Amino acid sequence: MLPPRRSEYLFRKNFKCHLFQSNSIMCIHNNHVNKGITIRIQNEKLYTECSVATMQANEVAYGLINNATIAVRNGRIEWVGDEKSIPTSYQGMQRESLGQRLVTPALIDCHTHLIFGGNRAHEFEMRMNGASYEEISDAGGGINSTVEATRLASDEELIQGALGRIDNLISEGVAVIEIKSGYGLTIDHELRMLRIARHLESLRPVKIMTTWLAAHSVPKDFKHRLDDYIDQIAITGLRQAEKEGIVDAVDGFCETIAFSPSQIDRLFKVAQSLNLPVKLHAEQLSNQNGALLVAQYNGLSADHLEYLSAKDVKEFSKSEAVAVMLPGAFYTLKETQVPPIAALRSAGVDMAVATDCNPGSSPISSILTAMNMACTQFSMTPEEALKGTTICAARALGLQGNYGVIEAGAQAELAVWNATHPAELTYWVGSSILHKRIFNRELS
């Protein structure tokens, strides 16, 4: 059973976050002495004395407006621009000075596996002693060891573990988190993961997007019967998840140690028949033409892409799919094959950045660290990294126009930073410079 909703809960280890309602304002005050994060909702307000990285596509880097003002009403942005050009209709709004701080859209982590049981520190040690990703998987470790721990964990244990990781992301300005299943590998356990993911949205001020990832690995009882697993578990369970209304997209792991393009194609056909968008773990360890399969279905995204060829970049760019960069896995696995960033950039492919938070290949719950890694390891620019966690990440989740941008009509999901320039978000490592997050909805 899922636990009852709570109005007072642990926001991060060692300090509490108190929720209260006062007229139209809802605040969550972080009592940590060094953070001072306030998250609030208000019917209308004028935020002044700030620099705003709107992330709108224009000739100005970051869509940056200095000496800016943002008008918010009923949870949406109504106007953003130079403070000298505030329309008369907004002059009477209550004002809040942001003290010359930087404002960006609240960040988006568009690829995570953050619901899981246990951890795999022992496998990390094995890897540091020379074992490869494939060797650990073939020996019964890897994803399957987390599957066992996740199946054994109670709902409450999975919820509490996930909340700790979500709180880390919230403390770095994240407002939207994608969460995948994939550590259950039975219909019941996969459905349980998505139900828990939906429930997490009621416990924290974040939007959760759920992804069906039953085609993540093959459990022991289906070893050498991958086609049966796709038909009996991945596809049958997907139909149930869609009927229950707990799935937003469909994913798979297309790789030599997982599923073939033809097997993923069968899953995607069913997803398409259910009007569910698709995405894929593709070209992480070898080129299986997974990205081209995503393009064929005009999917949301292809993720990892270390082994995407220059030829395939050209074909991939003909679709609207986003290339999601996951430098945390590249770092943890000590990979050497870098995604073709220059080719993707030249082809005009939108590139997102995510933590890939998971217990094995990317035990990272810091979006700012992922952004820094995208720059230092993959040679993305700071502007590309910020786009990758705002406007491009929104596109990778089908949320474009509502999240990841500061413009009229968008959700008033904002992050206020103790910074003066957007490059500082990718520059600092190991600490959050978030001043506060502003969000536009109540906890249910």
Image: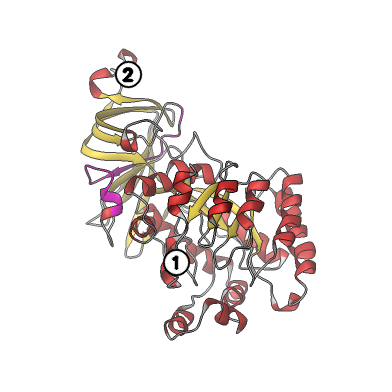
Q: Main secondary structure of the magenta part?
A: loop
From the viewer's perspective, tell me whether residue 340 is left or right of residue 292. left
Q: Residue at x 71, y 42 (%)?
A: 275
Q: Residue at x 47, y 50 (%)?
A: 343
Disc 2 is placed on an element classified as helix
Q: Nearer the viewer, residue 270 or 120?
A: 270
Q: Which of the 4 image quadrants contains residue 251?
A: bottom right
Front: mark 1 or 2: 1
Instruction: Say if the magenta span includes residue 423.
Output: yes
Q: Which of the 4 image quadrants contains residue 78?
A: top left
Q: What amino acid is at disc 2?
A: Tyr
- Is residue 4 visible in this depiction of the protein? no
Q: Nearer the viewer, residue 422 or 338?
A: 338
Disc 1 is placed on an element classified as helix
Task: List the single residue furthest toward the top.
Answer: 88
Q: Are marks 1 and 2 in contact (CB under 8 Å)?
A: no
Task: List the single residue furthest toward the front.
Answer: 311
Span of residues in magenta: 409-426
Dot 2 corresponds to which residue?
Answer: 90
Q: Residue at x 75, y 75 (%)?
A: 222
- Is residue 61 visible in this depiction of the protein? yes
User: Where 188 sits versus 436, above or below?
Assistant: below
x%, y% of residue 268?
71, 52
x%, y% of residue 154?
58, 70
Determine which of the numbered discs, if any, sits on residue 330 in the image. 1
Q: What amino acid is at disc 1?
A: Phe
Q: Nearer the viewer, residue 423 or 239?
A: 423
